[in-house]
């Protein structure tokens, strides 16, 4: 097995941490993004069947792009009850 390059590993870790930090920063400090989540949850509660399938797709995309799913989980509990 070929030993990994330590500089490449450090660069990858820094890039991943920067991306996660940027996403977390945007969630907490951009009001438009917060309002978009609220609007999406309201729309889910009004359109249950289509909202259910769209919610699954959005949740998968958020997982792939490291967006915290806790906001969507709490919102879906509110919307689908």
Image: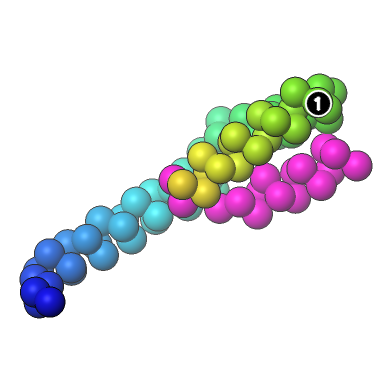
Does 25 sit above or below residue 45? below
- Residue 15: name its quadrant: bottom left
Q: Residue at x 71, y 50 (%)?
A: 73
Q: Residue at x 81, y 26 (%)?
A: 49
Q: Is 72 in the magenta?
A: yes
Element type at mark 1: helix
Question: Is residue 34 at all visible to an observer of this figure?
Answer: no
Does 1 sit above or below residue 16? below
Count of marks, rendered view: 1
Q: Mark 1 highlights which residue? A: 49
Does 49 sit above or below residue 9? above
Nearest the eye: 80 or 78: 80
Quadrant, the N terminus: bottom left
Colour scheme in the image? rainbow
- Is residue 53 found left or right of 68 in the rendered image? right
| Residue range (magenta) | 65-81
- The percent position of residue 31, horizontal first and vertical second, equals 57, 36
Spot the residue most to the front: 1
Q: Residue at x 46, y 51 (%)?
A: 66
- The percent position of residue 5, horizontal first and vertical second, equals 8, 71
Nearest the eye: 79 or 39: 79
Label 1 crowd bin: few (<14), some (14–19), many (20+), radius 10 Å: few
- The percent position of residue 63, horizontal first and vertical second, equals 52, 49
Q: Residue at x 56, y 53 (%)?
A: 68
Q: Is 69 in the magenta?
A: yes
- Residue 42: name its quadrant: top right
Quadrant, the C terminus: top right
Question: Is residue 3 at all visible to an observer of this figure?
Answer: yes
- Residue 43: name its quadrant: top right
């Amino acid at each position: 097995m070929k030993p990994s390059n330590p500089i490449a590993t450090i660069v990858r870790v820094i890039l991943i941490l920067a991306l996660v930090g940027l996403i977390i920063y945007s969630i907490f400090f951009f009001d438009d993004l917060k309002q978009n989540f609220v609007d999406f949850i309201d729309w889910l509660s009004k359109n249950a069947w289509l909202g259910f399938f769209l919610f699954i797709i959005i949740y998968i995309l958020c997982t792939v792009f490291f967006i915290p799913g806790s906001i969507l989980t709490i919102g879906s509990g509110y919307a689908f009850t």
